[in-house]
Amino acid sequence: MLGHSVFNPMSPQALAISNLTIVLMIISGFIVLGITGVLIYTMIRFRRRPGQTGEPPQQFGVVKLEIAWTVIPFILVLGLFGGSIAAMDLSSPPDGDPPADIVITGHQWWWEIRYPSGVVTANEIHLPVGKRMLVAVKSVDVIHSLWIPQLGGKMDFVPGQTNSMYLEADKAGTYLGNCVEFCGAGHAWMLARAIAQTPAQFDTWQQQQLRKAAPPAAGAVAQGAKLFGQLSCQSCHTLTGNPANQNANIGPDLTHFASRQTLASGRLTNTAGNVYYWLHDPGQVKPGVHMPNFHLTPSSLQYLTAYLESLK
Ligand code: CUA
């Protein structure tokens, strides 16, 4: 029922934040109910009655009460302050510059994800279960912010600055997230997902991602590869091992495009039908997207789709 919400935490960092939130809500709830209750009681019990004249007796300076309503909030705030410090300590990496386990770069409107092994992917953050990954976050254009509620707090991606966050998952699974800083027309469709796997699966995934793009087979796939070159797709998208590779990263690295669950930063699930739909008019699928509409013919769309879906 709690799904992908903060109340279904799946990491030590998210658990600390969730616990703090619950304690805060309980304390706030008691305060709201207490004050409202006393107010309603007072309004009824001490209301003006028929025949009553003049002002009711006034009271000034009840020392006991004043001490109580100073000391109790002070203790509560001090406790919450301590709790906040503990949660921050657990969920925010300390200053300093240890090598990051993952580097995520925000683009309008997708996430570039790099690992020290050389793996480059987009929009899907693979994590080995139970390992706290130190993530360095950057932006190439405007401020973005990544939030995967089940795994912890938000972190801003600021141009010209590297921030850091932890990403860790207690259990294997897929955890959904969003960009949570308005960054332009495509903001709402700048989705992200963390995919937590066993360490063995994570290693297998990395090995598979490190393979260079296979030379295209015959038929539609080869036709698609040719079109990919003719349309200059490689000016924006890298294909490792492709002779036309220019290390372009205006758009996501497509070397293992077909191994991803989604396309267009989580806008669509990665099926042949959706790839076709996307290529046919990217701006219709994701308003504001920087990828132009090439006004491709149905056969060209089929060839390109076949090629992209072959990039496992
Ligand atoms: Cu990126 Cu909002």
Image (tube, helix red, strand yellow):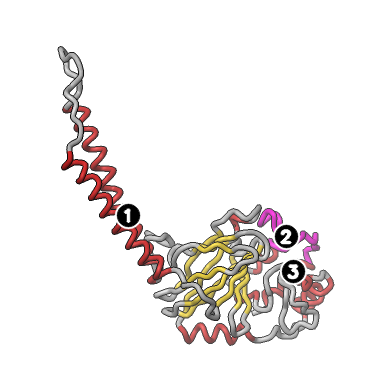
Report, in whole angstroms, how far the alpha carbon at label 1 lies from the one at label 2.
43 Å
10 Å crowding of disc 1: few (<14), some (14-19), many (20+): some
Q: Where, by quadrant of the figure, is residue 32 drawn? A: top left
The mark lying in front, picked from 1 and 3, is: 1
Query: Is residue 262 shown left or right of residue 282?
Result: left
- Looking at numbered disc 3 in the image, what kind of residue is underneath it? Gln
SS for callout 1: helix
Residue at the extreme right of the image, as rendered:
230
In this orientation, which residue lies closer to the viewer: 44 or 71? 71
10 Å crowding of disc 3: few (<14), some (14-19), many (20+): many
Residue 105, horizontal then vertical, whole percent: 62, 69
SS for callout 2: loop
Q: Which residues are magenta?
A: 278-299
SS for callout 3: helix
Report, in whole angstroms, how far the alpha carbon at label 2 lies from the one at label 3.
22 Å
Q: Let me know if residue 264 appears in the view.
A: no
In this orientation, which residue lies closer to the viewer: 218 or 107? 107
Residue where numbered disc 2 is placed: 290
Q: Where, by quadrant of the figure, is residue 123 drawn? A: bottom right
Residue where numbered disc 1 is placed: 24
- Looking at numbered disc 1 in the image, what kind of residue is underneath it? Leu
Quarter of the figure with the N terminus: bottom left
Tell me which residue sits at (48%, 77%) in the image.
133
Residue where numbered disc 3 is placed: 302
Q: Earlier in the sequence, mark 1 or mark 3?
A: 1
Tell me which residue sits at (27%, 49%) in the image.
73
Q: Earlier in the sequence, mark 1 or mark 2?
A: 1
- Looking at numbered disc 2 in the image, what kind of residue is underneath it? His
For residue 235, the mark is none
The number of discs equals 3
Q: Let me know if residue 189 appears in the view.
A: yes
Examine the structure image and report whether residue 176 is included in the region drawn in magenta.
no
